[in-house]
Image: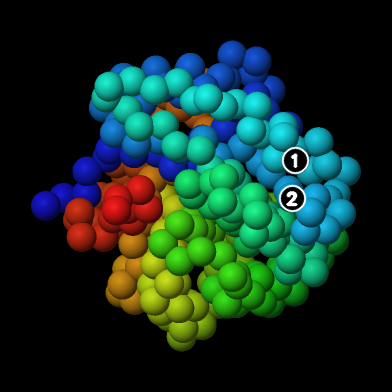
Amino acid sequence: MRFVLDHDYHLHTNLSSCCHEEEQTTERLLRYAEKNGLRDICLTNHFWDDAVCQPTKWYAPQNFAHIASARPLPQSDKVRFHFGCEGDMNERFIIGIGQEVRKEMELLVVPFTHMHMKEFVPTETPVEERANLYVQRMDVFMGSDLPDGKTGIAHMTTPLIARAQWTDHIRLLEMIPDDVFRYEFSRAAQRNFGIELNMDLAKYAPEELQSVLRPYFIAKECGCKFYLGSDAHSAAALEGAMKRFEDMVSALDLTEEDKFCPFES
């Protein structure tokens, strides 16, 4: 059976500092889910646990008390609304989600690709060095103590990994050999880490698509499971999410057997 578009596990409200629409509320997210026939959605505002280590200035206000103020989440008889977070990995490869606070989360969505943050990766770092850092960060992520079956790998091919020019992130991905991706995705599959799908394929020229889709095809070959995560911070992002999901599922030819299901018992 073809992969059903029935969820969105990466959603932000105005509690995330990079969300600039006051109307981006949990009620708006629930309406979006109902409109598009989604069964499960997860709130994943940006978060850094100051019990782990000192956060950056940007992350400091986004502590647990802040993101937990969104609860209780609105519910409906059609949609299950879950509580999670989008964590992060700093320049020392520390993941800022402590053991105690994990008990409050139904899903941890964590990128190792926030390489646009100058506190984590200096802005002037060339693409070649960024490619090495990408692999190091990915390797630490796969060996971390994040919970098996309850962790999603957020936007792993985002342009944020190298964005001085549009083609930089594509070049970076091309520098990573198949066997490196194969090794890391085999680890991800073993731990049942979900792979997030939210790329906007329409932004890429036909000759670029092979490069940006290659990691996902390798992940699929390794037995990884996939989930839909719009990473929406605005009404416009919500509006275009289903088209992006459809394009990614079609490009990868995914079935229900390929689906990451963190909320199923």
Mark 1: few, some, or many residues within 10 Å (few <14, many ≥20)? some
Which percent across, then down, holds residue 192? 39, 67
Q: Report the side of 185 relative to 231 (left or right).
A: left
Which percent across, then down, holds residue 151? 49, 58
Residue at the image point whose x is 70% and y is 40% from the top = 64
* Depth check, front residue: 202 or 244: 244
Contact between marks 1 and 2 (CB within 8 A): the answer is yes
* Number of numbered tags placed on the structure image: 2
Q: Report the side of 47 relative to 53 (left or right).
A: left
Instruction: Give the answer, above or below, for where 38 lies relative to 142.
Output: above
Kind of residue sitting beneath label 1? Asn
Which percent across, then down, holds residue 101? 64, 50
The residue at which mark 1 appears reads as 63
Residue 168: image quadrant is bottom right
Residue 49 - label: 2
Residue 24 - label: none
Residue at the image point whose x is 37% and y is 53% from the top = 262
Residue 129: image quadrant is bottom right
Q: Can residue 141 be seen in the rendering of this structure?
A: yes
Residue at the image point whose x is 29% and y is 33% from the top = 39
Q: Can residue 115 be seen in the rendering of this structure?
A: no
* Depth check, front residue: 102 or 8: 102
Give me the C-alpha separation between circle 1 and circle 2.
Answer: 6 Å
Residue at the image point whose x is 53% and y is 25% from the top = 72
